[in-house]
Structures are given as structure tokens and as C-alpha cells.
Image (spheres, rainbow, N blue to C red):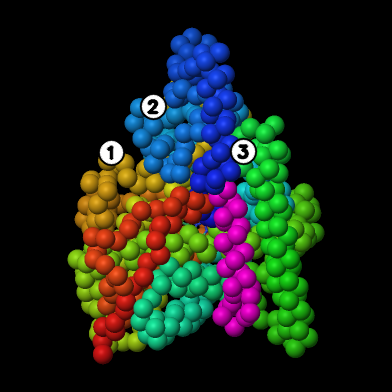
Amino acid sequence: MYPSSSPIVPLLLYPPAMLLMLALTILAIVLSSLFFFKKSPTIINTSSVQPLPPSPPKFPIIGNLHQLGSSPHRFLRSLSECYGSLMLLHLGHLPVLVTSSPSIIREITQTQNHLFANRPSLKVPDTLFHHGHDIAFAPYGEYWREMKKATILHLLSNKKVGSYKYAREEELTFMMKEIERTMLVDITKMFHVLSRDVISRAVTGESTRNKLWGDDLSKLIDDSSRMMGEFYVGDYIPWLGKIVGVVTGFERRLRNTVERSDKFLEEIVKEHRRRMAKRKEEGDGDATHECFLDALLTLDQWELKCKGVVFDSESIKAVILDMFGAGTDPTSISMEWTMAELICHPAAMRKLKEEIIKVVGPNKACIKEEQLTDMSYLKAVVKEALRLHPPAAIILPRQLIQDTNIKGYRIPKGTMVLINAWATGRDPKIWDSPEEFRPERFINGEAIDINFSSHGYQLLAFGAGRRSCPGMKFSVTLIELAIANLVYVFDWKLAKGEIEDIDMSEVYGLNTRKREALMLIATKTFK
Ligand code: HEM
């Protein structure tokens, strides 16, 4: 996923945006005292016109923008307790449909998938990806289709993911040695480096460990996802965008990020072209070792042109930035939440360790990928962590391309759609004791038949439908392998404080991460 949650994002996290919202709120209150506090049409009951979905009251100009706050996923869930499973909000001029109900999500991502498969045009991704040259924010159409197809074929298919086995095991071994050396572990950082390096090997054929640009790549990922998480008022109130963008320094920061990102990616591509040429000279054209960049640089331009798709150097940069951005943070954040839940639940940690020892036997150096198949509790643990903590708490937004209706409500063309995956994962109508971490629910409980791609639309960490995440197999394989090895080889405890003190609160953003880094102490299980 790009990456992290949606760019309606951490409204009001950013101080200038906060001031602006305050000013707009005051302006709106003044206006509303002149024009009345306007309640949106809840249900217009005429026989010819279907009603719009229920809406909370809104202010003129800003609509409901001021209400989202720093945890929009939580706010929207509480709002839906009053307005139901299908609500229509207004963010500035933009109507926004919000839901977390599986039956409505089925309607959006399956039954009417073709109408809801577009992404809205938003300032930050438009600028960063040079107007939809990536996949995650590309408008629905031929370009998106061809790029997604190429990415699955050359990077993310089951066969390709299988071929990175050696890379995963090698990077993991390196991480385990590092843990053994230090014993006091910044798990957050370690998981970031592991995800980044495995993705780098699949995309560029090289680990950043052997390169000087590992830190630069981390900075690029960090900067671009922070920028994606920033709130740009012009997306919702266009006439205010330019002024506020300049006054708050947003335009400058965005320009700088794009310049740095372009320069960095151009360097990577240039160096890769040199290596490809050298390999060719040396007669090493073995396609089995082909990385994603090799494939992108040799895509059949003629075939793409015939389909009306322009694939140029902007596309290459945008697509690889998408892979680093969409892949690294959600994968490492998922590992971190999984580890944090296991630390908070020692009984689950013990049960998992017992399962692994039963499958692998004691005293082995590490776990091989083939052995994961027999670890059903491990799989349940990962699903349970992602149920409670989907990195994209609100899935990347979609936009409706023509008027339609859902459950008897009229939904106008252009409406933005937000699926609150975090709320679905904690819905008491779906899950028993939804706030509890209980992996057993996936083994012998109410969720025995639920998985990430099941058609009940209850477990939405990877989204659903045509725009769903193509990186699921890639990341779940890495998450399971990393967690299994860490739990098998080491015993873990908190570096400071007691389990009850651990801060499990989150910071909402493109990817909703744990507020505090997880610092742990490792000791070897088998001496
Ligand atoms: C635990 C890890 C991951 C999570 C939780 C995650 C989650 C998501 C989500 C929720 C979406 C939006 C789906 C929708 O709109 O229905 C998405 C889209 C996407 N993800 Fe992932 N993702 C992960 C890993 C990856 C990886 C490893 C890659 C690639 C290396 C990747 C590439 C993408 C791309 C390209 C899209 C855009 C798909 C489209 O718009 O058609 N993701 N991801």
C-alpha cells in the first residue's frame, strides 16, 4: 500500500494547518450564524429522487473538515454509531462516502468495482508521482492496468516472491547476527531495515547494506510518506490551496522532496543501466536473476504504445518509488505491531514458541521458509495483529466515476470513498471481544474461515477488489519468517518497565504506526 493510510490524513497534526482550520472554523461559525447552521439533507423522500446517505451537520466552506482531528479512523467510527454504516461527509467541496460495513465494502469493491476503481487526484501524490505515473495513485485506466500487470508479473507473483527466498533468508540472518551482537534491540528500526533491504534486492537486485545509499533510501521513504500524510487544504478548498501552500511553506517542502526524490531515483536507474550493460558485455543474461528494474528497463515499448500507454523515465521513477514507499513501511510496521502484541501477551508468545519448536525441533540455527506451512498459530498471530492494527487504517481513497446508488441511497459522481479498515477490524458485529488480541479466533473461533482475501470483507489490511494490494504475498511471507525466527531463536523482554506500561497507542498517518519505538532485550533460547 502506498503506503500508509490515506491522504485525508493527519489533519491538524501539522501546526499551520491547525491554525488555518481554526481560522476557517471561526469564519464558518460567523457565516453559519448568518445563514443558519445547515443540516445536510438526511433523507429526501421523493419517489423520483433517491435520498443521499445520512450526513452529520456541516459548516459552510469547510464542511466537516475541522472534525476529523488527529485520529480520523477513531472519529469516523464514533460518528458512524450515530449516522450508520454508510455516511456522507463533506470535506470542503468534496462529498466523501465513509463506510466500514462488509456488505457495503462488497458493493464498492466487487459488485460496482468498475465504478469505484479510480483514485482521486490529490496534490501530494500527483506531484510526487508526476501525475499518476505510479500504480497506487494512477487513475483507473490502461496505464494503471499495464503497470499493475507488469509489477505482478516481474515483482510480486507467487513465483517471483518464491525466488527471493535466498534474499529474505540472507537479510534475516544478518539481522539475527546484529541482534546477537547488541542484545538491546530497537525493533522498530531493525524491521524497517529488514523490509527496506529485502524490497531493495527484489527491485534493484542489490541490498542497501552493501551500498552507501541505504540511509538515503530510508530518508526518501520517510520524507515521501510524511509528505503524503500532510494535509493540503487545496484538495478540499481549491481557492485556498495556493495561498496556504505558500504561507505555510508546504509548496516549498513538497518541491524539495520531489527534487531530492527525482535525483536519488535517477542515480539508481543510471547505475542500474551501467550494471546491465556490463552484464551484457560479459554475456550474463540469465533471466532467472532478473530484478524488477531489469524488467522495467526492457519493457516492450512498442506493445505498450499500441495500447496507448506512454511509459517513460518518469514512469520508472514513479513505479519504483511506489514499491519502496508502498512496501517498506507497511511491512515493517506490521512486524512491529505483531511483536508488540506478543510482548503484551506472554501466553500467546509461549504458545507460538511451542508450536515452532514442535515443527522445527530445538537447537537449530534458524527456520527455513518451507517449515512455515505447518505453523497455523503463527499465521493466526499475524492475522490477528493486522486485524487490530492495519497499517492503512483508512484505505487509500477511491473516487466514483459516475452517479450510482448503494442500498437505496444516491451517490453522486466524483464522491470520494473512504473505507475504514481499522473500524471493520474492531466491529463487534463481526468479531467476538473485538478489542482483545486472541489469535485462537482464526483457529477454532468465529474467524476460522477468514483470511486477507476472503470475500466476507472483514479483514481488510490489504484492501479489496481491483485496487487491492499486489504485495500481500511478498509481505506476509517476510513477516511470518521474521516473527518465527525471532520468537524461536530468542527470548524477549521489554528494555524498560512492565508489560502493563507498554504504550500501544498509535500515530495516524499514511501508515498508522506505534507511537513509541519498541525497545526490547533479547537472550538466546538455546545456549
Ligand atoms: C503488510 C504490508 C502491506 C500492507 C498492509 C499493504 C496494504 C495496502 C492497501 C490497504 C492498499 C490499498 C488497497 C485498496 O485500495 O483496496 C495497498 C495498495 C498497494 N500496495 Fe500494498 N501493502 C503492503 C505491502 C506492499 C508491498 C510489499 C508492495 C510492493 C512491493 C505493495 C504495493 C502496493 C501497490 C502498488 C498498491 C496500489 C494498488 C492499486 O492501486 O492498484 N504493498 N496496499
Residue hosting label 1: 429
Q: Is mark 2 within 8 Å of ligand 1?
A: no
Where disc 3 sits, the SS reads: helix
Marks 1/2 in contact by CB < 8 Å: the verdict is no
In the image, taking residue 203 as reference, residue 33 lies left or right, namely left
Q: Position of residue 414 (x, y in %)?
A: 61, 31
Amino acid type for the residue under numbered disc 1: Lys
Residue at point 61%, 34% (across, down)? 236
Say whether disc 1 or disc 2 marks the residue closer to the N-terminus.
2
Q: Is residue 389 above or below residue 92?
A: below
Q: Going 63% across and 75% down the picture, which residue do you hit? A: 213
Which disc is residue 83 wearing?
2
Viewer-closest of 416 and 512 = 512
Mark in the foreground, 3 or 2? 3
Mark 3: amino acid: Val
Other-residue count near label 3 (Cα within 10 Å), few / some / many at <14 / 14–19 / ≥20: many
Q: Which residues are magenta?
A: 204-230
Q: Quadrant of the C terminus?
A: bottom left
Picture quadrant of residue 484: bottom left
Tag nearer the camera, 1 or 2:
2
- SS at mark 1? loop
Q: Are marks 3 and 2 in contact (CB under 8 Å)?
A: no
* Amino acid under disc 2: Tyr
Q: Position of residue 20 (x, y in %)?
A: 58, 37
Q: Could you tell me how far apart the alpha carbons at marks 3 and 2 are, in whole angstroms?
A: 26 Å
Instruction: Please say if 70 is above or below 153.
Output: above
Residue 250 on the magenta segment:
no
Q: State whether residue 345 appears in this view.
A: yes
Q: Position of residue 96 (x, y in %)?
A: 53, 32
Q: Where does label 3 land, which residue? A: 233
